[in-house]
Image: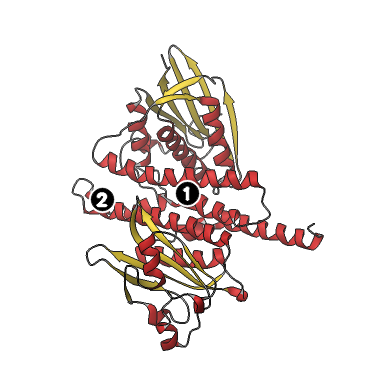
Protein backbone atom coordinates (compact mmCIF):
# COMPACT_ATOMS: atom_id res chain seq x y z
CA UNK A 1 0.00 0.00 0.00
CA UNK A 2 1.37 3.40 -0.97
CA UNK A 3 2.16 5.56 2.08
CA UNK A 4 1.39 9.29 2.28
CA UNK A 5 4.97 10.35 1.50
CA UNK A 6 5.09 8.25 -1.68
CA UNK A 7 1.68 9.53 -2.70
CA UNK A 8 2.79 13.17 -2.31
CA UNK A 9 5.97 12.45 -4.25
CA UNK A 10 3.94 10.89 -7.06
CA UNK A 11 1.58 13.87 -7.14
CA UNK A 12 4.51 16.29 -7.19
CA UNK A 13 6.07 14.39 -10.10
CA UNK A 14 2.82 14.43 -12.05
CA UNK A 15 2.38 18.15 -11.39
CA UNK A 16 5.93 18.83 -12.60
CA UNK A 17 5.30 16.81 -15.77
CA UNK A 18 2.07 18.70 -16.48
CA UNK A 19 3.81 22.05 -15.97
CA UNK A 20 6.53 20.96 -18.40
CA UNK A 21 3.81 19.91 -20.84
CA UNK A 22 2.29 23.40 -20.86
CA UNK A 23 5.66 25.14 -21.16
CA UNK A 24 6.99 23.00 -24.03
CA UNK A 25 6.01 25.55 -26.69
CA UNK A 26 8.96 27.66 -25.57
CA UNK A 27 11.34 24.84 -26.56
CA UNK A 28 9.68 23.83 -29.81
CA UNK A 29 9.25 27.37 -31.10
CA UNK A 30 12.99 27.95 -30.72
CA UNK A 31 13.80 25.38 -33.43
CA UNK A 32 15.30 27.05 -36.47
CA UNK A 33 17.51 24.42 -38.13
CA UNK A 34 18.33 20.72 -38.11
CA UNK A 35 21.24 21.10 -35.68
CA UNK A 36 19.01 22.73 -33.08
CA UNK A 37 16.30 20.17 -33.74
CA UNK A 38 18.57 17.17 -33.13
CA UNK A 39 20.10 18.87 -30.10
CA UNK A 40 16.61 19.33 -28.67
CA UNK A 41 15.78 15.68 -29.31
CA UNK A 42 18.88 14.53 -27.41
CA UNK A 43 18.24 16.85 -24.46
CA UNK A 44 14.62 15.74 -24.22
CA UNK A 45 15.68 12.08 -24.49
CA UNK A 46 18.11 12.47 -21.61
CA UNK A 47 15.54 14.30 -19.49
CA UNK A 48 12.78 11.79 -20.27
CA UNK A 49 14.74 8.71 -19.12
CA UNK A 50 17.13 10.47 -16.69
CA UNK A 51 20.30 9.61 -18.65
CA UNK A 52 23.79 11.11 -18.35
CA UNK A 53 24.53 11.44 -22.06
CA UNK A 54 23.23 10.66 -25.54
CA UNK A 55 24.12 10.54 -29.21
CA UNK A 56 22.43 10.35 -32.61
CA UNK A 57 23.86 8.43 -35.56
CA UNK A 58 22.79 9.21 -39.12
CA UNK A 59 22.29 6.37 -41.59
CA UNK A 60 23.60 7.30 -45.04
CA UNK A 61 21.98 5.09 -47.71
CA UNK A 62 24.68 6.06 -50.21
CA UNK A 63 27.56 4.44 -48.30
CA UNK A 64 25.45 2.16 -46.10
CA UNK A 65 27.18 3.39 -42.93
CA UNK A 66 26.16 5.01 -39.64
CA UNK A 67 27.76 8.39 -38.94
CA UNK A 68 27.55 9.80 -35.39
CA UNK A 69 26.61 13.41 -36.03
CA UNK A 70 25.78 14.64 -32.50
CA UNK A 71 26.85 13.52 -29.01
CA UNK A 72 26.41 14.95 -25.52
CA UNK A 73 28.33 14.08 -22.36
CA UNK A 74 31.94 13.75 -21.23
CA UNK A 75 33.06 11.76 -24.28
CA UNK A 76 30.91 13.70 -26.75
CA UNK A 77 33.84 15.27 -28.60
CA UNK A 78 35.54 11.92 -29.15
CA UNK A 79 32.36 10.17 -30.23
CA UNK A 80 31.34 12.73 -32.85
CA UNK A 81 32.27 11.84 -36.43
CA UNK A 82 32.76 8.12 -35.66
CA UNK A 83 31.57 5.81 -38.44
CA UNK A 84 30.05 2.36 -37.92
CA UNK A 85 28.94 -0.41 -40.23
CA UNK A 86 25.44 -1.85 -39.97
CA UNK A 87 25.66 -4.60 -37.36
CA UNK A 88 28.78 -3.11 -35.72
CA UNK A 89 28.51 -2.29 -32.04
CA UNK A 90 25.30 -1.43 -30.26
CA UNK A 91 24.26 1.32 -32.67
CA UNK A 92 24.95 -0.91 -35.66
CA UNK A 93 23.02 -3.79 -34.09
CA UNK A 94 19.98 -1.57 -33.52
CA UNK A 95 20.22 -0.30 -37.11
CA UNK A 96 20.33 -3.89 -38.38
CA UNK A 97 17.45 -5.21 -36.26
CA UNK A 98 15.33 -2.01 -36.31
CA UNK A 99 14.48 -2.82 -32.67
CA UNK A 100 15.15 -1.10 -29.35
CA UNK A 101 18.06 -2.57 -27.39
CA UNK A 102 18.52 -2.18 -23.63
CA UNK A 103 21.78 -3.24 -21.99
CA UNK A 104 21.92 -3.29 -18.19
CA UNK A 105 25.63 -4.15 -17.94
CA UNK A 106 27.86 -3.44 -20.93
CA UNK A 107 30.63 -5.60 -19.45
CA UNK A 108 28.47 -8.63 -20.22
CA UNK A 109 27.49 -7.48 -23.72
CA UNK A 110 29.74 -8.69 -26.57
CA UNK A 111 28.27 -6.14 -28.99
CA UNK A 112 29.51 -3.22 -26.90
CA UNK A 113 32.65 -1.52 -28.28
CA UNK A 114 34.78 -0.31 -25.34
CA UNK A 115 37.42 1.46 -27.44
CA UNK A 116 35.91 4.92 -26.89
CA UNK A 117 35.77 4.38 -23.12
CA UNK A 118 39.44 3.34 -23.12
CA UNK A 119 40.45 6.35 -25.17
CA UNK A 120 38.47 8.93 -23.18
CA UNK A 121 38.36 7.51 -19.66
CA UNK A 122 34.58 7.66 -19.73
CA UNK A 123 32.88 4.69 -18.09
CA UNK A 124 29.77 3.29 -19.77
CA UNK A 125 27.74 1.03 -17.52
CA UNK A 126 24.32 0.81 -19.16
CA UNK A 127 22.67 2.08 -22.30
CA UNK A 128 19.45 2.19 -24.28
CA UNK A 129 19.20 2.62 -28.06
CA UNK A 130 16.30 2.78 -30.50
CA UNK A 131 15.94 3.30 -34.27
CA UNK A 132 14.43 6.44 -35.79
CA UNK A 133 12.43 5.42 -38.86
CA UNK A 134 10.31 7.33 -41.39
CA UNK A 135 7.69 5.24 -43.20
CA UNK A 136 9.70 2.07 -42.60
CA UNK A 137 12.96 3.68 -43.73
CA UNK A 138 15.88 3.87 -41.26
CA UNK A 139 17.18 7.42 -40.93
CA UNK A 140 18.95 7.56 -37.56
CA UNK A 141 19.65 5.70 -34.32
CA UNK A 142 19.15 7.40 -30.94
CA UNK A 143 21.15 6.21 -27.91
CA UNK A 144 21.15 7.28 -24.25
CA UNK A 145 23.90 6.21 -21.83
CA UNK A 146 24.09 5.62 -18.05
CA UNK A 147 20.95 6.05 -15.98
CA UNK A 148 21.60 8.70 -13.35
CA UNK A 149 21.88 7.50 -9.79
CA UNK A 150 23.45 4.22 -10.82
CA UNK A 151 20.15 2.48 -11.52
CA UNK A 152 19.23 0.64 -14.71
CA UNK A 153 16.99 1.68 -17.55
CA UNK A 154 13.49 0.21 -17.26
CA UNK A 155 10.84 -1.03 -19.65
CA UNK A 156 9.06 2.30 -19.15
CA UNK A 157 12.26 4.03 -20.27
CA UNK A 158 12.25 1.86 -23.40
CA UNK A 159 8.70 2.83 -24.23
CA UNK A 160 9.32 6.52 -23.57
CA UNK A 161 12.49 6.59 -25.69
CA UNK A 162 10.59 4.91 -28.53
CA UNK A 163 7.91 7.62 -28.29
CA UNK A 164 10.62 10.29 -28.45
CA UNK A 165 12.17 8.49 -31.44
CA UNK A 166 8.81 8.43 -33.23
CA UNK A 167 8.41 12.12 -32.48
CA UNK A 168 11.91 12.75 -33.83
CA UNK A 169 11.12 10.84 -37.02
CA UNK A 170 8.07 12.99 -37.66
CA UNK A 171 9.90 16.26 -37.10
CA UNK A 172 12.91 15.21 -39.16
CA UNK A 173 10.66 14.04 -41.99
CA UNK A 174 8.79 17.33 -41.97
CA UNK A 175 12.05 19.24 -42.03
CA UNK A 176 13.06 17.18 -45.07
CA UNK A 177 9.73 17.89 -46.76
CA UNK A 178 10.12 21.57 -46.05
CA UNK A 179 13.60 21.53 -47.55
CA UNK A 180 12.15 20.00 -50.71
CA UNK A 181 9.48 22.68 -50.78
CA UNK A 182 12.12 25.38 -50.48
CA UNK A 183 13.88 23.92 -53.51
CA UNK A 184 10.67 23.81 -55.53
CA UNK A 185 10.12 26.49 -58.16
CA UNK A 186 6.38 26.20 -57.60
CA UNK A 187 6.63 27.50 -54.04
CA UNK A 188 9.82 29.53 -54.06
CA UNK A 189 7.97 32.12 -51.98
CA UNK A 190 7.33 29.51 -49.31
CA UNK A 191 11.07 28.95 -49.06
CA UNK A 192 11.36 32.39 -47.48
CA UNK A 193 8.83 31.28 -44.88
CA UNK A 194 10.36 27.91 -44.00
CA UNK A 195 11.10 28.89 -40.42
CA UNK A 196 7.51 30.04 -39.94
CA UNK A 197 6.12 26.79 -41.36
CA UNK A 198 8.24 24.78 -38.92
CA UNK A 199 6.84 26.96 -36.16
CA UNK A 200 3.32 25.99 -37.20
CA UNK A 201 4.17 22.38 -36.34
CA UNK A 202 4.82 23.17 -32.69
CA UNK A 203 1.21 22.40 -31.67
CA UNK A 204 1.14 18.65 -32.35
CA UNK A 205 4.77 18.29 -31.31
CA UNK A 206 3.96 19.93 -27.96
CA UNK A 207 1.07 17.54 -27.39
CA UNK A 208 3.20 14.51 -28.29
CA UNK A 209 6.00 15.53 -25.98
CA UNK A 210 3.69 16.42 -23.12
CA UNK A 211 1.71 13.20 -23.19
CA UNK A 212 4.94 11.21 -23.58
CA UNK A 213 6.11 12.65 -20.25
CA UNK A 214 2.78 11.88 -18.62
CA UNK A 215 2.96 8.27 -19.82
CA UNK A 216 6.20 7.84 -17.91
CA UNK A 217 4.47 8.59 -14.61
CA UNK A 218 3.75 5.29 -12.82
CA UNK A 219 0.92 6.88 -10.83
CA UNK A 220 -1.45 7.56 -13.71
CA UNK A 221 -4.39 5.22 -14.19
CA UNK A 222 -4.56 2.69 -17.00
CA UNK A 223 -7.53 4.59 -18.39
CA UNK A 224 -5.51 7.80 -18.64
CA UNK A 225 -2.48 5.91 -19.96
CA UNK A 226 -4.61 4.52 -22.78
CA UNK A 227 -6.20 7.91 -23.45
CA UNK A 228 -2.83 9.72 -23.59
CA UNK A 229 -1.44 7.03 -25.90
CA UNK A 230 -4.41 7.45 -28.26
CA UNK A 231 -3.88 11.21 -28.31
CA UNK A 232 -0.21 10.78 -29.17
CA UNK A 233 -1.15 8.59 -32.12
CA UNK A 234 -3.74 11.13 -33.26
CA UNK A 235 -1.24 13.97 -33.18
CA UNK A 236 1.42 11.92 -34.95
CA UNK A 237 -1.09 11.39 -37.74
CA UNK A 238 -2.01 15.06 -37.67
CA UNK A 239 1.66 16.06 -37.92
CA UNK A 240 2.25 13.94 -41.01
CA UNK A 241 -1.02 15.10 -42.56
CA UNK A 242 -0.06 18.74 -42.12
CA UNK A 243 3.08 18.10 -44.16
CA UNK A 244 1.11 16.28 -46.84
CA UNK A 245 -1.38 19.13 -47.04
CA UNK A 246 1.43 21.58 -47.76
CA UNK A 247 2.73 19.35 -50.53
CA UNK A 248 -0.77 18.75 -51.92
CA UNK A 249 -1.46 22.47 -51.93
CA UNK A 250 1.80 23.19 -53.75
CA UNK A 251 0.70 20.72 -56.44
CA UNK A 252 -2.77 22.21 -56.68
CA UNK A 253 -4.55 19.03 -55.52
CA UNK A 254 -6.26 18.33 -52.18
CA UNK A 255 -7.18 14.64 -51.96
CA UNK A 256 -10.09 13.85 -49.66
CA UNK A 257 -11.16 10.64 -47.96
CA UNK A 258 -14.82 11.39 -47.25
CA UNK A 259 -17.04 9.08 -45.24
CA UNK A 260 -20.12 9.31 -42.98
CA UNK A 261 -19.33 10.96 -39.64
CA UNK A 262 -21.40 11.32 -36.47
CA UNK A 263 -20.87 14.98 -35.62
CA UNK A 264 -21.51 14.61 -31.88
CA UNK A 265 -18.63 12.17 -31.44
CA UNK A 266 -16.40 14.04 -33.88
CA UNK A 267 -16.87 17.40 -32.18
CA UNK A 268 -16.50 15.74 -28.78
CA UNK A 269 -13.03 14.52 -29.74
CA UNK A 270 -12.09 18.03 -30.84
CA UNK A 271 -13.35 19.51 -27.55
CA UNK A 272 -11.31 16.99 -25.55
CA UNK A 273 -8.17 17.69 -27.56
CA UNK A 274 -8.59 21.46 -27.17
CA UNK A 275 -9.15 21.31 -23.43
CA UNK A 276 -6.26 18.87 -22.84
CA UNK A 277 -3.82 20.58 -25.19
CA UNK A 278 -1.36 23.35 -24.37
CA UNK A 279 -1.73 26.92 -25.61
CA UNK A 280 -5.40 27.58 -24.82
CA UNK A 281 -4.40 29.61 -21.77
CA UNK A 282 -7.39 31.40 -20.26
CA UNK A 283 -9.60 30.97 -23.32
CA UNK A 284 -12.96 29.39 -22.45
CA UNK A 285 -14.44 26.92 -24.95
CA UNK A 286 -18.25 26.99 -25.25
CA UNK A 287 -20.56 25.03 -27.53
CA UNK A 288 -24.04 25.55 -29.01
CA UNK A 289 -24.86 22.50 -31.10
CA UNK A 290 -28.13 22.91 -32.99
CA UNK A 291 -27.34 20.03 -35.32
CA UNK A 292 -25.97 16.69 -34.16
CA UNK A 293 -26.78 14.49 -37.12
CA UNK A 294 -24.44 12.87 -39.59
CA UNK A 295 -22.18 14.48 -42.13
CA UNK A 296 -20.28 13.27 -45.18
CA UNK A 297 -16.70 14.54 -44.99
CA UNK A 298 -13.02 13.78 -44.52
CA UNK A 299 -13.02 14.01 -40.70
CA UNK A 300 -9.25 14.37 -40.33
CA UNK A 301 -8.94 17.16 -42.88
CA UNK A 302 -11.92 19.11 -41.55
CA UNK A 303 -10.73 18.66 -37.99
CA UNK A 304 -7.42 20.29 -38.90
CA UNK A 305 -9.34 23.16 -40.45
CA UNK A 306 -11.21 23.66 -37.17
CA UNK A 307 -7.98 23.30 -35.17
CA UNK A 308 -6.31 25.99 -37.27
CA UNK A 309 -9.30 28.29 -36.84
CA UNK A 310 -9.30 27.67 -33.09
CA UNK A 311 -5.56 28.35 -32.92
CA UNK A 312 -6.05 31.65 -34.77
CA UNK A 313 -8.84 32.53 -32.36
CA UNK A 314 -6.60 31.89 -29.34
CA UNK A 315 -3.91 34.12 -30.90
CA UNK A 316 -6.54 36.86 -31.33
CA UNK A 317 -7.33 36.76 -27.59
CA UNK A 318 -3.95 37.17 -25.83
CA UNK A 319 -5.66 38.40 -22.67
CA UNK A 320 -8.23 35.61 -22.73
CA UNK A 321 -11.76 35.33 -24.03
CA UNK A 322 -14.37 32.91 -25.33
CA UNK A 323 -14.15 30.47 -28.21
CA UNK A 324 -17.58 29.33 -29.37
CA UNK A 325 -18.34 26.31 -31.55
CA UNK A 326 -21.89 26.25 -32.92
CA UNK A 327 -23.72 24.12 -35.47
CA UNK A 328 -26.97 24.29 -37.36
CA UNK A 329 -28.75 22.92 -40.43
CA UNK A 330 -31.33 24.13 -42.96
CA UNK A 331 -32.15 23.96 -46.68
CA UNK A 332 -30.07 20.85 -47.34
CA UNK A 333 -26.94 22.24 -45.67
CA UNK A 334 -25.29 22.06 -42.27
CA UNK A 335 -22.76 24.50 -40.89
CA UNK A 336 -20.13 24.81 -38.18
CA UNK A 337 -19.17 28.24 -36.86
CA UNK A 338 -15.93 29.00 -35.00
CA UNK A 339 -16.34 32.33 -33.21
CA UNK A 340 -14.14 34.38 -30.89
CA UNK A 341 -14.41 37.73 -29.12
CA UNK A 342 -10.85 38.70 -29.94
CA UNK A 343 -9.41 41.78 -31.60
CA UNK A 344 -10.90 41.07 -35.04
CA UNK A 345 -9.34 41.07 -38.52
CA UNK A 346 -8.20 44.48 -39.83
CA UNK A 347 -10.53 45.90 -42.48
CA UNK A 348 -7.74 46.38 -45.03
CA UNK A 349 -6.99 42.64 -45.30
CA UNK A 350 -10.35 41.16 -44.39
CA UNK A 351 -11.45 40.60 -47.99
CA UNK A 352 -8.16 38.79 -48.75
CA UNK A 353 -7.71 36.76 -45.56
CA UNK A 354 -8.51 33.46 -47.31
CA UNK A 355 -5.88 34.07 -49.99
CA UNK A 356 -2.37 32.52 -49.82
CA UNK A 357 0.34 34.38 -47.85
CA UNK A 358 -2.05 36.89 -46.28
CA UNK A 359 -1.64 37.23 -42.50
CA UNK A 360 -3.13 39.59 -39.94
CA UNK A 361 0.23 40.45 -38.41
CA UNK A 362 1.13 37.30 -36.47
CA UNK A 363 4.89 37.02 -35.99
CA UNK A 364 5.04 33.39 -37.13
CA UNK A 365 2.03 33.09 -39.43
CA UNK A 366 2.63 31.51 -42.82
CA UNK A 367 -0.48 32.84 -44.53
CA UNK A 368 -1.21 29.36 -45.89
CA UNK A 369 -3.45 27.79 -43.23
CA UNK A 370 -6.63 29.64 -44.21
CA UNK A 371 -5.98 29.21 -47.93
CA UNK A 372 -5.59 25.45 -47.42
CA UNK A 373 -8.71 25.44 -45.20
CA UNK A 374 -10.68 27.10 -48.01
CA UNK A 375 -9.48 24.47 -50.50
CA UNK A 376 -10.47 21.63 -48.15
CA UNK A 377 -13.97 22.98 -47.47
CA UNK A 378 -14.60 23.72 -51.14
CA UNK A 379 -13.34 20.22 -51.99
CA UNK A 380 -16.33 18.95 -50.00
CA UNK A 381 -18.68 21.04 -52.11
CA UNK A 382 -18.98 23.57 -49.31
CA UNK A 383 -17.95 27.16 -48.57
CA UNK A 384 -15.77 28.91 -46.00
CA UNK A 385 -16.71 32.46 -45.11
CA UNK A 386 -15.64 35.01 -42.50
CA UNK A 387 -17.27 37.90 -40.65
CA UNK A 388 -15.21 40.15 -38.39
CA UNK A 389 -15.29 43.42 -36.45
CA UNK A 390 -12.47 45.35 -34.83
CA UNK A 391 -12.89 47.38 -31.64
CA UNK A 392 -15.15 50.40 -32.25
CA UNK A 393 -15.83 49.49 -35.88
CA UNK A 394 -19.57 49.10 -35.27
CA UNK A 395 -21.16 51.19 -32.52
CA UNK A 396 -22.41 49.02 -29.68
CA UNK A 397 -20.89 45.84 -31.15
CA UNK A 398 -17.89 44.10 -29.58
CA UNK A 399 -14.90 43.01 -31.62
CA UNK A 400 -14.59 39.42 -32.76
CA UNK A 401 -14.43 37.02 -35.69
CA UNK A 402 -16.61 34.15 -36.94
CA UNK A 403 -15.55 31.61 -39.54
CA UNK A 404 -18.41 29.56 -41.01
CA UNK A 405 -17.88 26.18 -42.64
CA UNK A 406 -20.94 25.19 -44.67
CA UNK A 407 -21.38 21.69 -46.12
CA UNK A 408 -24.15 19.93 -48.04
CA UNK A 409 -26.15 17.45 -45.96
CA UNK A 410 -25.39 13.81 -46.66
CA UNK A 411 -27.97 12.32 -49.02
Q: Secondary structure at mark 2?
A: helix
Percent from the top left, x then y, of residue 319?
58, 47
Residue depicted at 45% across the width and 68% down the height: 143
Residue 39 is situated, as x and y percent measured from the top left of the image, at: 42, 67
Along the viewing direction, whichever of 88 and 228 lies nearer the viewer: 88
- The mark that comes first in sequence, 1 or 2, is 2
Numbered disc 1: secondary structure: helix
Asked if labels 2 and 1 touch by Cβ distance under 8 angstroms, the answer is no
- Foreground pick, 159 / 267: 159
**Residue that numbered label 1 is attached to:** 203
Task: Kindly indicate the quadrant of the structure image that contains residue 71.
Answer: bottom left
Residue 116, compared with residue 240, is above or below; it is: below
What residue sits 51% from the left and 32% below the top?
Answer: 339
Res. 181 mark: 2
Tell me residue 263's x, y (percent).
Answer: 51, 25
Rendered residue at 58%/25% (across/down): 288
Give the quarter of the image for residue 381. top left
Amino acid sequence: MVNETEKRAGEALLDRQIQTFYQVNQFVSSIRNMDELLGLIMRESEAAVNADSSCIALFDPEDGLLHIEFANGEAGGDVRSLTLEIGQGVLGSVAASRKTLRIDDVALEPRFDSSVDKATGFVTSSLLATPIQCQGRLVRVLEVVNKRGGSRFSENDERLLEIVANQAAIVVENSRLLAETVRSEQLSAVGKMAASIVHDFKGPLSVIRGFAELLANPDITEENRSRFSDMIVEDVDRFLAMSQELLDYSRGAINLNSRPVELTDWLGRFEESFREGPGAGNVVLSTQFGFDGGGEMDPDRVRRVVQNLASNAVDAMPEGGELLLSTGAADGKWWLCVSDNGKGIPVEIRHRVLEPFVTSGEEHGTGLALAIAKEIVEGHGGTLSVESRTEGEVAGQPSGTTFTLEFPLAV
